[in-house]
Image (cartoon, rainbow, N blue to C red):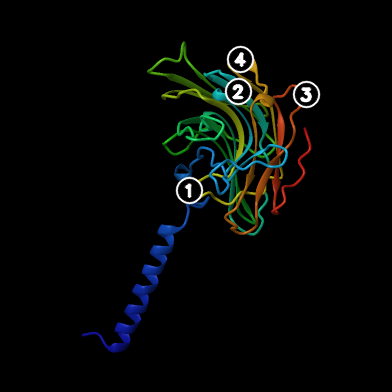
């Protein structure tokens, strides 16, 4: 039989182990864990007390996880079967806590009408991840994702400052069963990756986004300073994002800092812009490229 002292020590150990297990079960995945558990979610539109989408005084749509530009079928009366964009992989800075950011192009995942009711739950996309893990560790990689499945890292090596061109296209008339080719080229190193996948999309939007990824909850946005996107096309034509929506990210969960992301106005060709990290409640000014 164990002594009272031994039983007390054992009880303390079990309580400690249970506490750690519970904490681990409720905490979001961190960068040191499997990358495959990360998601890049559909747009989370912030709404007022009446349930209407919140917009800034100059008409920018506010979101809890997306910042960037989008054109949607309900705005242009078009369906989208191909898209391409180029961006420079931003350098992330560790601001005292683990944080994440993603730069990507995709089809789907946006609003099906002006009131954003419902939101499109399909999304096929590919991009780069930029995570600040610790004062001495950052994590950069390329990935693709087809909701509702998790993101999958690709073999393409990316580093901060690399110029990336990513594209996705649906074969033929894009009829079911749809066949999608996803491709990504590192223009800096001349390396590339490409693969073909089966996926069913209603083809309702094209977006170029800087995002706070998702893992049970929206994760803290990494300090990416600035991301520059350019040369966006849809169905082989230059995108005119002025026909769509300009989206800013406002983190209203108040974790750590009040990290958010603003976007600039469009370049003259209407298919390029900057996204700018904002560490405070007020969105930082974001100049054009």
Element type at marker 1?
A: loop
Mark 3 → mark 4, Cα distance in angstroms: 18 Å
Q: Which residue is mark 4?
A: 236
Q: Are marks 4 and 2 in contact (CB under 8 Å)?
A: no
> How many marks can you see?
4
Mark 4 → mark 1, Cα distance in angstroms: 34 Å
Element type at marker 2?
A: strand
Q: Which residue is mark 1?
A: 215
Mark before the other along the chain sequence, 3 or 4: 4
Mark before the other along the chain sequence, 3 or 1: 1
Quarter of the image with the N terminus is: bottom left
Q: Which residue is mark 2?
A: 84
233 and 38: which is toward the camera? 233
Q: Residue furthest left?
A: 1
Q: Which residue is mark 3?
A: 268
4 and 260: which is toward the camera? 260
Q: Residue 101, position in %: x, y? A: 60, 44
Seen at 45% across and 42% down, the residue is 36
58 and 221: which is toward the camera? 58
Q: Residue 131, position in %: x, y? A: 59, 47
Vertical comparison of 42 with 64: above or below: above
Question: In the visual, does 225 lie left or right of 5?
Answer: right
Mark before the other along the chain sequence, 2 or 3: 2
Mark 2 → mark 3, Cα distance in angstroms: 18 Å
Asked if residue 233 can be seen in this view, the reply is: yes
């Amino acid at each position: 039989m164990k002594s009272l002292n031994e039983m007390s020590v054992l009880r303390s150990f079990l309580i400690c182990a249970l506490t750690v297990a519970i904490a681990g079960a409720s905490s979001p995945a961190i960068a040191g864990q499997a990358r495959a558990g990360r998601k890049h979610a559909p747009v989370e539109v912030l709404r007022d007390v009446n349930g209407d989408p919140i917009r800034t005084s100059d008409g920018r749509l506010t979101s809890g996880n997306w910042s960037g530009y989008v054109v949607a079928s309900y705005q242009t009366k078009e369906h989208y079967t191909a898209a391409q964009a180029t961006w420079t992989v931003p350098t992330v800075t560790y601001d005292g806590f683990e944080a994440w950011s993603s730069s990507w192009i995709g089809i789907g995942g946006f609003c099906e009408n002006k009131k954003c009711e419902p939101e499109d739950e399909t999304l096929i996309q590919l991009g780069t991840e930029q995570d600040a893990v610790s004062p001495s560790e950052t994590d950069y990689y390329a990935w693709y994702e087809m909701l509702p499945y998790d993101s999958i890292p690709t073999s393409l090596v990316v580093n901060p400052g690399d110029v990336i061109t990513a594209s996705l296209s649906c074969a033929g008339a894009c009829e079911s069963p749809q066949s999608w080719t996803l491709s990504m080229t590192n223009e800096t190193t001349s390396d590339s990756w490409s693969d073909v996948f089966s996926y069913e999309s209603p083809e309702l939007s094209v977006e170029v986004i800087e995002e706070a990824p998702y893992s049970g909850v929206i994760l803290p946005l990494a300090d990416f300073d600035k991301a520059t996107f350019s040369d966006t096309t849809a169905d082989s034509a230059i995108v005119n994002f002025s026909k769509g929506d300009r989206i800013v990210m406002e983190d209203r969960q108040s974790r750590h800092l009040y990290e958010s992301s603003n976007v600039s106005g469009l370049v003259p060709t209407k298919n390029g812009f900057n996204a700018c990290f904002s560490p405070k409640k007020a969105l930082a000014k974001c100049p054009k490229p």
